[in-house]
């Protein structure tokens, strides 16, 4: 029988059958292992979230980038930096500017 292993962001590996794994896989690259429990590293999840914003807004707002970044830094950045749970981080997605959230 073949075993499946999960490797966290720091390279720690665990047998998947013995791990408690988050049901939300959007932030898979932010997973951290503590014993047999895998949770999200919020600092890394925020980086992933910000990268997704950049990916989505680039083709939409390239010409408006300077204006958009000033507006985001004035308002929305605090919602991202103050998020202390994955649910709050997902809620920080600005659908009015970026369109539908990939985290819905």
Image (spheres, rainbow, N blue to C red):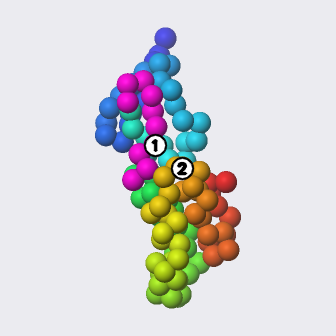
Question: Disc number at residue 11?
Answer: none
The picture places residue 20, in percent across and down from the top left corner, at 51, 26
- Is 34 left or right of 18, judged from the image as shown? left
Q: Residues within 10 Å of mark 2 (few under 14, many from 20)?
A: some
Residue 8, by quadrant, is top left
The picture places residue 43, in percent across and down from the top left corner, at 39, 53
What residue sits right under mark 2 in the picture?
A: 86
Instruction: Confirm whether the magenta stretch covers residue 38.
Output: yes
Q: What is the span of residues highlighted in magenta in the rendered image?
A: 34-43
Instruction: Confirm whether the magenta stretch covers residue 75.
Output: no
Mark 1 secondary-structure assignment = strand
Question: Disc number at residue 40?
Answer: 1
- Residues at badges 1 and 2 in contact (C-beta under 8 Å)? yes
Position above or below: 38 against 2: below
Position above or below: 34 against 88: above
The picture places residue 61, in percent across and down from the top left corner, at 56, 81
Query: Is residue 4 in sight in this rendering?
Result: no
Position above or below: 1 against 78: above
Position above or below: 24 against 78: above
The picture places residue 38, in percent across and down from the top left corner, at 45, 33
Count how many numbered circles sit on residues in the image. Answer: 2
Mark 2 secondary-structure assignment = helix
The disc, 1 or 2, on the residue closer to the chain's N-terminal end is: 1
Residue drawn at point x = 43 percent, y = 40 percent: 31
Residue drawn at point x = 51 percent, y = 88 percent: 67
Q: Residues within 10 Å of mark 1 (few under 14, many from 20)?
A: many
* Structural distance between the alpha carbons of marks 1 and 2: 8 Å
Quarter occupied by the C terminus: bottom right
* Most distant residue in the top direction: 1
Q: Nearer the viewer, residue 8 or 59?
A: 8
Residue drawn at point x = 52 percent, y = 49 percent: 85
Query: Is residue 37 in sight in this rendering?
Result: yes
């Amino acid at each position: 029988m073949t075993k499946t292993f999960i490797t966290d962001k720091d390279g720690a590996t665990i047998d998947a059958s013995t791990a408690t794994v988050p049901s939300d896989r959007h932030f898979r690259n932010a997973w951290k292992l503590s014993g047999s429990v895998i949770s999200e590293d919020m600092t890394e999840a925020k980086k992933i979230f910000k990268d997704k914003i950049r990916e989505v807004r680039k083709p939409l707002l390239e010409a408006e980038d300077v204006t958009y970044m000033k507006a985001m830094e004035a308002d929305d950045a605090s919602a991202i930096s103050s998020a202390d749970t994955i649910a709050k981080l997902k809620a920080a997605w600005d659908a009015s500017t970026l369109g539908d959230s990939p985290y819905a």
